């Protein structure tokens, strides 16, 4: 009897342990949040004349060739036609910046260009100007598979992965507990997606606007009742990088539409 | 920044063909029911009216209300009658107005 009892306890502990240590989703089962959406929202994303994020892309296209800063240069003056020069860029961001010796996301990269090349003031995070530019850039990579290959990024990907699996907040949850272990199930009324970062910046119906991946991460942290990382903290970029590396092989859908 | 519009009309159509028209515009559609961080109500600021003219003849009209989402998207159908201009007009609170026009050729 006592042996049976011990056996039950032991298996319970083992089950608990296997549930807590989340495994990455195997490549064959990896799918974009797109596939878990309803027909109507998918149609909205697929049709460029119905996708509200295209309003940002069009604004971004206009801003691309607008001269700014003391240098009086536009993005197009250096980079030319974005359709050719920016294709695939969003698929490999966040990318390593040798100057900072750490990864930067697309929005930070835009601001580096602004301060260094255009000699203009950096655009505030989540501002309309920054979002229209990143939406326009990301749009040029639509269909390109996500790929994070730079070896210099490895320690940052690992750090992001560590943040992803770390329990935090008042309800003591990790990102992985929902997005690795329980995707496809429901959190209250909402379907839990795998949490791949292949559509950002994206139009979220709940926000009624377009937002960055950092905004989404802050949303998740608030939902977990965890303390937010300070604005612009490296943790956000490490997490974004891990999410990107976790989404490798999925096609960029930016700018996507999500509920 | 002025309102960005995005309209979709077929460039060509056969006479008598039923064509789909889609019109999207950037607008916050502030309902007037929300409060800011200091508890002050945020005044209503919405688009109230949308009109579509086909060679000067009104073919579609919509009244918009606070429950309509930001960046309103309106899709409807009309019959392609003759070549010419299709105009779109949006009007709203605080003197908001935006217009867009495209041409259509009838084979």
Image: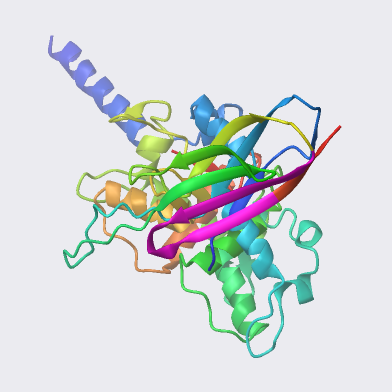
Examine the structure image and report whether residue B28 is included in the region drawn in magenta.
no
Does residue A39 appear in the picture of this structure? yes
Residue at (24, 52) in percent of width and height: B33
Nearest the eye: A154 or A86: A86
Q: Is residue A193 left or right of residue A122?
A: left
Q: What is the x, y in percent for residue B13?
A: 79, 31
* Residue at the right extreme, as displayed: B107
Does residue A199 appear in the picture of this structure? no
Q: Label the magenta part by its dominant secondary structure.
A: strand
Looking at the picture, does residue A64 appear above or below residue A158? below
Residue at (42, 62) in percent of width and height: A235
Q: Which residues lie in the magenta part?
A: B83-101
Examine the structure image and report whether residue B93 is included in the region drawn in magenta.
yes
Residue at (31, 25) in percent of width and height: A15
Nearest the eye: A124 or A90: A124
Q: Is residue A157 left or right of residue A138?
A: left
Q: What is the x, y in percent for residue A204?
A: 45, 45
* Residue at the front extreme, as displayed: B57
Q: What is the x, y in percent for residue A8?
A: 21, 17
């Amino acid at each position: 009897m006592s042996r049976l009892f011990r056996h039950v306890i032991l298996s319970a502990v083992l089950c608990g342990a296997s549930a807590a240590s989340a495994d990455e989703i195997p490549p064959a089962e990896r799918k974009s949040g797109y596939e878990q959406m309803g027909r109507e929202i998918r149609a909205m994303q697929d049709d460029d004349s119905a996708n509200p994020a295209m309003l940002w892309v069009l604004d971004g296209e206009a801003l691309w060739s607008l001269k700014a800063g003391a240098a009086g240069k536009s993005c197009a003056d250096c980079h030319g036609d974005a359709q050719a020069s920016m294709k695939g860029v969003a698929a490999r961001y966040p990318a390593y910046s040798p100057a900072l010796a750490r990864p930067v996301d697309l929005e930070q990269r835009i601001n580096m260009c602004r301060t260094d090349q255009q000699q203009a003031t950096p655009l505030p995070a989540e501002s309309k100007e920054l979002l229209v530019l990143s939406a326009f850039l990301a749009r040029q990579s639509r269909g390109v598979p996500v790929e994070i290959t730079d070896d210099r990024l490895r320690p940052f990907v690992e750090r992001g992965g560590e943040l992803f699996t770390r329990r935090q907040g008042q309800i003591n949850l990790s990102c992985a507990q929902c997005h690795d272990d329980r995707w496809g199930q429901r959190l209250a009324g909402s379907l839990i997606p795998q949490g791949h970062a292949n559509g950002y910046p994206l139009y979220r119906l709940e926000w009624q606007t377009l937002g960055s991946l950092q905004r989404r991460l802050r949303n998740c942290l608030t939902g977990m009742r965890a303390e937010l990382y300070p604005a612009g903290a490296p943790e956000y970029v490490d997490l974004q990088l891990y999410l990107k590396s976790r989404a490798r092989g999925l096609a960029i859908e930016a700018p996507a539409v999500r509920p | 920044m002025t309102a960005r519009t995005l309209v979709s009309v077929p460039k060509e159509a056969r006479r008598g063909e039923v064509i789909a028209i889609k019109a999207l515009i950037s607008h916050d559609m502030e309902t007037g029911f929300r409060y800011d961080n200091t508890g002050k109500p945020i005044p209503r600021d919405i688009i109230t009216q949308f009109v579509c003219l086909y060679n000067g003849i009104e073919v579609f009209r919509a009244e918009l209300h606070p429950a309509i989402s930001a960046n309103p998207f309106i899709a409807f159908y009309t019959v392609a009658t003759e070549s010419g201009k299709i105009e779109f007009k949006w009007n709203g609170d605080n003197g908001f107005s935006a217009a867009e026009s495209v041409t259509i050729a009838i084979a």
